[in-house]
Amino acid sequence: MARYSRLPGSVALITLHNPPVNALSAAVRQGIVDAVQRALKDPKVTSVVICGQNGKFCGGADIREFAGPMSGPPLVPMIHAIEAVDKPVAAAIEGVALGGGLELALGCHYRIAHSKAVLGLPEVTLGLLPGAGGSQRLPRLIGLTAALDLITTGRHVSAAEALKLGILDQVTDNNAVDLAVEFVRSVAGQPLDSRRLSTLPCPCPPDVDSLLDKVMSKVRQRSRGALAPVACVQALRAAASLPYAQGMEKERELMATLFNSGQARALQYAFFSQRVVGKWSLPSGASWDNSTARTISKAAVIGLGTMGRGIVVALALTGISVVAVETQEKQLAEASRVVPAMLQREAGRRRLATPPGVISFSSNLQDVSEVELVIEAVFEDMSLKLQVFKHLASVCRPGTLLCSNTSGLDIDQLAAVTQSPGLVVGMHFFAPAHVMKLLEVVYGPRSSPEAVATAMQLGKRMGKVGVAVGNCPGFVGNRMLKPYLEQANFLLEEGATPQQVDEALEEFGFPMGVFRMSDLSGLDVGWRIRKEAGLTGPGVESTRTRQGRRYSPLPDQMCEAGRLGQKTGKGWYQYDGPGGRVARSDPWVDIFLETYRAEHGLVARSITPEEILERCLYALINEGFNILQDAVAAGPEDIDAIYVFGYGWPRHRGGPMFHAGQVGLGRILERLNHHHSHPDVPHLKPSTLLRRLVAAGSPPVQKWREFINKERVHS
Ligand code: 3H9
């Protein structure tokens, strides 16, 4: 809805009302159309202010409406009608003016904002472009170069930056609506022609074509197959080269293509998934609604390797004081030097409004006795972690939350050595921990709702996407990664090269294929884990079956040959030297693979990119179904958020479980069955849940949670 009121004197006030963000639903659009008509017709009204209820101007078009048929007055003519009004219209922007919200403001003759307001055209992040005239009006207002930046990245800008760019006319620390009312009164009766953005030329640099070409090639590189950023550049090219009406026609055409693309659906699903996982609930029934999070002001991090350092910085950036503990002197000295610099750099980059928390470095575990929460980030070794947890249990005051940054070890085992197992949870960060958005919050059967709520709340404060997951080896992310990596190695045995596998995955949209990624993170990481698991090492026979499963010893043999990846200058690829970054294919690897195949009597066959994707991705997806069946993840959105925010799954493909729905569950099942029937690919046995979903007619991904819960009740 939109409320109409006439203020004492001659100003009409139109207030958008659609909590929580005053999205432009059909009812709101209708309300605006009616209110503008009323203001036009009322001879006593000389000027108009449009604002939003509850200190929020407008969060844009109502994304929920995109799934259904269009109803109500369309946005484009509504904004044109506002621009055409012959009485001055000002947008009073408080809170947010995003997407269609900013486009509505661009249709007004003046824009006045509160200093804390945030503005932007983030449509590109939803697989769209600013399709209510934003792609044509913004460049006319602030110039092509600045508009390209805002529209292709979708970044939000502060009121101060928006003022500098020329989007806003005035910014105030006081009431923006009062100022806008006062302002429109003062300009009533003045000519409005120069205020109608659609009538203005688009300011462009002299070398406009070369600018557009440069931006286009950058955007194509960055977008990894996403359509919307490319369409945004095309729309802006139209703004720069065509009259407004033709530019609008181009905007409409491009918008229609994007709107009907699977990518827009995937990105909108990703938007809502992020919000769904924030409202966590556990199988016990615990959730935000019935759990209270503690507010943490003092924390400790144990272990200052790469992960520990990042976690210290992430905590300090939220204003939490951190005791950073490292028992190895050399490591402590290095961390004391590096961490403050990391913090300063990151604080500067984020333009923090409040000072970061104080960090104190110590080699003594005793120094954590006064903190409210500890995050253990020592080496991934159970016996070491158990030792640390026992020690913590004896030095921390009762009630301290004890968290482990393990990437897959058993949280219950750690909890069992403390006096209060309910206060133990996993907080699995991703490197670099102060940058990566994902946080897996791992609960065991004894973790208290308060501990989970506190870890989730802390994650939110750190700007993370926290996902609550159950305890099992590898949790969600790494558990799914295992069959994916396995299949990649099997494909090498069967005839593929690392480049072929990587190219197929990169073409799909991953920033890096599995072998390039393995070179970057170091092949020895997995080697150590496999040695601990007794899968390789002295005394273990070099066969292709270990512990009753098909096993590829290829990565172990690479490590044995000293090829640990970028750090040794050689891995699945060769580099210019140790620490080199540019991967080149290595004839050594080809010979190594040929020799290996000959030794094991394997005949190389030609493998298509389709098979690579099916074997790697469907293996990962299948494990996702097992995870849902085991209730380790509450719903497909949780898995998808984990993969999008932590594992480089292309956002425009929604996430692995969404992708499964797009491909068709029947097709995934059929392909898994096909590969599984091959005697050498035993791990691709389709999950029972996948079979059941197919038998139930393959409901859409949004219905799986309900389906799983029903199945659980009946089983
Ligand atoms: C567009 O405008 C297209 C046009 O160019 C052309 C059309 C022809 N619609 O994020 P929060 C819900 S595309 C519907 O937790 P915050 C959200 O789902 C749009 N619902 O709060 C959540 O619901 P629930 C371009 C929306 O304070 C609740 O509001 N606009 C919308 O952390 C609270 O959200 C954007 O891309 C919406 N537009 O952040 C802006 N926005 O409680 C998208 C939010 O049921 N929105 N909801 O889970 C945002 O970026 C953030 O929500 C915002 C508030 C910054 C506004």
Image (cartoon, grey):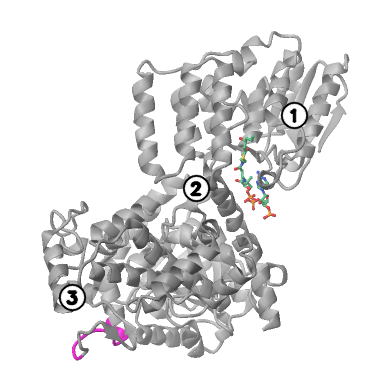
Are the residues flagged by discs 1 and 2 in contact, CB closer than 8 Å? Answer: no
Query: Which of 470 and 669 lies nearest the eye of the viewer?
Result: 669
Check disc 2: other Cα within 10 Å, few if <14, some if 14-19, many if 20+: few
Q: Which residue is mark 2?
A: 352
Query: Which of 248 and 198 lies nearest the eye of the viewer?
Result: 248
Q: Is residue 299 visible?
A: no
Query: Which of 451 and 593 lies nearest the eye of the viewer?
Result: 593
Q: Which residue is mark 3?
A: 557
Disc 1 versus disc 2: distance between alpha carbons? 31 Å
The first of marks 1 and 3 along the sequence is 1
The answer to whether residue 637 is above or below residue 414 is above
Q: Give SS at disc 3.
A: helix
In which quadrant is the N terminus drawn?
Answer: top right
Residue, x 61% and y 39% (percent of image)? 116
Mark 2 CB near ligand 1 (8 Å cut): no
Magenta span of residues: 531-539
The answer to whether residue 631 is above or below residue 456 is below
Disc 3 versus disc 2: distance between alpha carbons? 48 Å
Q: Is residue 201 left or right of residue 191?
A: left
Q: Main secondary structure of the magenta part?
A: loop
